[in-house]
Image: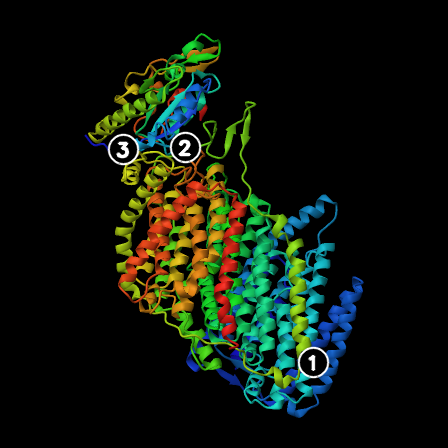
Amino acid sequence: MDHKMSRSPWVIHYDGSSCNGCDIEVLASLTPLFDAERFGVVNTGNPKHADIFLVTGSVNAQNLPVVRQIYNQMLELKCVVACGICACSGGVFRDAYNVIGGVDRAIPVDVYAPGCAVRPETVIDAIVEACGILDQKEAVMRAGGDPLTVGGAATWDGGVELGEGGFVAAGAGADDAPAGTSAAGDAPAAAKEGE
Amino acid sequence: MTLLYFLTLFPLVPALGMLLVRGDRARDAVGLIGSGIIMAVTVVVAVMFFGTGPQSFEVAPGTSHVLSIISSVIDVILCAVILYNAYKYRNALTTVLGIVQLVGSLAFAAMTLPAAEAVIATPLYLDYMSVIMVLAVGIVGSLICVYALGYMKDFQAHDEHEAALRGQTAPDRRPQFLALMFLFLSAMFVIVTSDNLEWLFCGWEITTVCSFLMIGYTRTPEAIKNAFTQIILNMLGGIAFLIGLMYLHVNGMPLTISGMIELSGAGTAQSALLVMPVILLSLAALTKAAQMPFHTWLLGAMVAPTPTSALLHSSTMVKAGVFLMVKLSPLYAIYPVTGFMVTSVGAITFLLAALMAISQSNAKRVLAYSTISNLGLISACLGVGAPEAVWAAIFLILFHTVAKSLLFLCVGTAEHHIGSRNIEDMDGMFSRMPHLTRLMMLGIMGMFVAPFGMLVSKWGALVAFAQTGNVLMIMVLAFGSAATFYFWGKWLAKLSGVDPTAQNVEVNVHKTEWMALNTIAALLILCCVAFPVISSGLVSPYLAMVFGRVPYVIGKDAMYLMVVIVAFIAVVLLTSFRVSNKPHVNVYLSGVGTDNYRHFRGSMGHEVKAEKRNWYSEDALGEKRIGPAGSVVCCSIILFALLCCAWIGPERLAMSAPSVLRGKYFEGSGVVGIFIGTVAFALLAPLVGGLIDGVDRKLSARMQGRVGPRLLQPFYDVAKLLRKAPASVNTMDDTYMACALIFTVVGGGIFVSGSNTLLCAFMVTLAAIFVVLASASTQSPFAQVGADRELLQVMSYEPAVLLMSVGLYLATDSFDSIAVTGQSAPIIAYSAPIFLALLAVLTIKLRKSPFDLSYSHHAHQEIVQGVATEMSGGTLAKMTLMHWCETVLFLMWVGMFFVWDNPVSWLVALVVMAATYFVEVLIDNTFARSTWRSCFKLGWGVALVFGLLNLMPILVDVFI
């Protein structure tokens, strides 16, 4: 398998609504002690450059469109890592009135990295895991397939969208198919209002 | 001969026509036909000139006498016009000066007219310089008249609208205005073809009074005030001119330019007396050319309708001043005090006006300061009086004429359609007025970007100053050019912004305006492309005629290369050429953007627009601060020169200027060599650069106690970027980035093939401009802040880079990098301070620095990456490749200082390059970051101190 993608995982880090514990650990994974740059990891801070989207914290009404917009501005091939239990499922806040749930309520997630807070080793492990998915996606794409059939996007239920009376589960209609076809973030209909 | 009369007198016909006919259509017809005939006659004159060569025309004594009487009468009439206006508006100073001039004119007429021997046998002439000026005035001037036809309709409509709001009516003064414009052309033809100084003076005064009337066109208090500023300053010059003429006549010297030059060669007691008239005529020329302290009139002239500004700035008025100095330039070498005055005033004006231009946001004012600054450079060159410098000056005049007229006309049209002449309001102009903006960008590039003519001329000036050992001028040029780069660059960046939401507002621009704009733009490209021909066909023969030798400033191959590049840029800019058909994405606005034009959802839930303004540094570079200081210094220089003439005996002033003419070798390796070099560089530099980058990241990691990435990580990164899905925020940025990469590689090719380092440095600057365009064309505030930082960064390191070339030249008498291999010692032995300066700016250029929002890939992580914000995939890969190439090129510049004719030296150079890079990494990782302002001060500070230190010996050399 071709490893061109996985050798240069550039990340972008976004804090949904976390307690900042996971954010500190994500950044810690880049420090001399854990040195994620051994694997070529660069924190770009820019969706146009990044391949892997590290999201910490749960999704709520305020950040739902933001997460979607950043995700849509990332170019294929791309992966999403939910860092920490809040990002995975909403964690202890999942029943809070304003919390919608984990990151997969907004965008398809490829790798879930649990923990409260997530450990730097777990973050690096998750990035390496995401690298594998990037390579798989590339292989599929080079064979003429759709990269969205690989990873979290393949089984994603479409998440939720902001309706008139609150949040509603996105139906399985064609409009709600995740993240467009091949390129350049054709926004899913659910994310349109964020653009 | 007849043709010359016709050329001079014909513009009076449309002038008269304008006064007589009524109605827009009739005026258009008169204007178009008149301008057409003037242009045709100009071309015929030029063509016939190439048949006959330079010649003087005899005029029968009787006719000549009559013409002299007529010119005296005109002088008196002009004084009467001035006095009438002075009385009408109760301006005391103007009245006094008017009376002085009237008395002077009458006295002079009384002196010369009765004397039969004063009749000059050949009062008219046509030489190469005259033909250049006739073409410039005839073609560009007429086109401005054509433009005025359409422009003045809008202007009048606007005036009437305003007046109607106040319940008044606006008087229609357009006939007089257009008539004055044609009269202006006629006067200019008199100036550039009269050897008889008395006639020349008559034309001189006509232009003064015409511009007085045109500036006052709107009759607003401000216009009247500025018109009087203009007339007062120019009358001072006029009176100096008149005194000079009287001095000539009283001392029995000829009243012709050719006579003065002939006399100066005689070396007699009488020829020594010439110093006084030369200095007075130069003073008149400096006032006309709006040099400090007289520059205020040109700024004031901005209140007039735009065609006036275009006419005054480009082909006429100010060019009359520099034309006279071109004619006098052989004398400046013979009478050093006059050359000193002209060069110093010019140099100071060049530098200070360029700095003041940075602080301006009004487009017309920026143009005005840039005119003043350019005229300063022209004067500085002319004052040197060496053919190399005059070569540069003539090209500066030519390119300035064409590029500046294009810019003024563009700004005028833009003002009528976007309702503002403020550069800040030109956001998104690229989409609002697509064609006009491209012409404007072309004009701006013509003013300062390599290798358009303007920059070639600056290069010529640099060579001339280096050859004549004029150290202070080299420094002024290095810093003035950097300032010029900045103020043009930020305007260019502003224009390039693509705004997808914009309405196209240029649909109702008048046809006559388009006609003029397109023709002048075509002329600009033609001048750049035909520049080698103009040099060998017109300018060199002129210099051979006047100075007896042909200057050799630029190698032929370098010239051809430049022509190709200009053509390339013109194609990229003006055609709808696109390499990008990528899917569109919106700009990044931290995930809360709502469209592709800077709108985002604010924290309070409503939509907010992000604005990005330019950097002006009004506190440091404001005109209130710099203007007076410059005026005081220039005044003192002029007074000093005048006092020298008065106190020191003229015979002691007539000695040749102390200057050492250095050898000159500009052979390079030819076009074929450069091509091979470019291919080699294109293949090797990315490999080496990528490796250096890998080592760099590894080293940095070690210094921070980390393991760091794999050695080949940079290559993996680029390979990855090339595999990403393509996307683009607009259709231009990838094209611009491709151009930047190409120019960097060509620059590297020029260097490795052993050719001209100046050309190499200019290519790097050109690449930087295109990086700026690529990021400024997006509507991302992050990218545009990055573009600003990039411009500031270039301004900081540019002087030191230019000085590097000068250091090479001083050590080897050549700008070619290959020359070092012929030396018996490495050039570090001569140029150690300059080398240190280069090292200092290398840190700014290659490493993390406060400019790090510019495109260094060492940019701070986690911060959005400035210039590169909107670049993705292939575009970002191109930028990375470009950065590698630049790293290699800059390190080679460092290595160059350590190579001599010993093969071992190559090893030494390699070691030094490695050591330098290690030190840069070390500095980067151990020193705290400073602010960009302090970095900027550092960049200019070291260049100034070390540059001067290094160049001082030459200054002393002259006197030893």
Colour basis: rainbow
Tell me which chain the residue with mark 3 is part of: A
Name the kind of residue labelled 3 in the image. Arg
**Callout 2 and callout 1 share a chain:** no
Dot 2 falls on a residue whose secondary structure is loop
Q: CA distance from mark 2 to mark 3?
A: 19 Å
Q: Which residue is mark 1?
A: B647
Asked if labels 1 and 2 touch by Cβ distance under 8 angstroms, the answer is no
Res. B581 visible in picture: no
Please, is residue B886 above or below residue B385 in the view? above
Left or right: B765 in relation to A180: right
Q: Quadrant of residue B231?
A: bottom right
Residue sitting nearer the eye, B702 or B496: B702
Mark 1: give few (<14), some (14-19) or many (20+) Cα within 10 Å.
few
Which chain does the residue under circle 1 lie in? B
Question: What count of labels does the image hold?
Answer: 3
Residue type, mark 2 in image: Asn
Which residue is identified by label 3?
A: A7
Residue B461: image location, x then y, percent: 48, 67
Q: Position of residue B522 (x, y in %)?
A: 44, 60
Rendered location of residue B782, percent (x, y): 47, 37
Q: Subunit of mark 2?
A: A
Question: Label 1 sits on what residue type?
Answer: Trp
Secondary structure under tag 1 reads: helix
Query: Which mark, residue A46?
Result: 2
Residue B343: image tag? none
Query: Who is closer to the viewer here, B158 or B813?
Result: B813
C-alpha separation, residue under disc 2 versus residue under disc 1: 70 Å
* SS at circle 3: loop
Tell me which label, 2 or 3, sits earlier in the chain: 3
Question: In this view of the protein, which residue sits in the foreground, B368 or B49?
Answer: B368
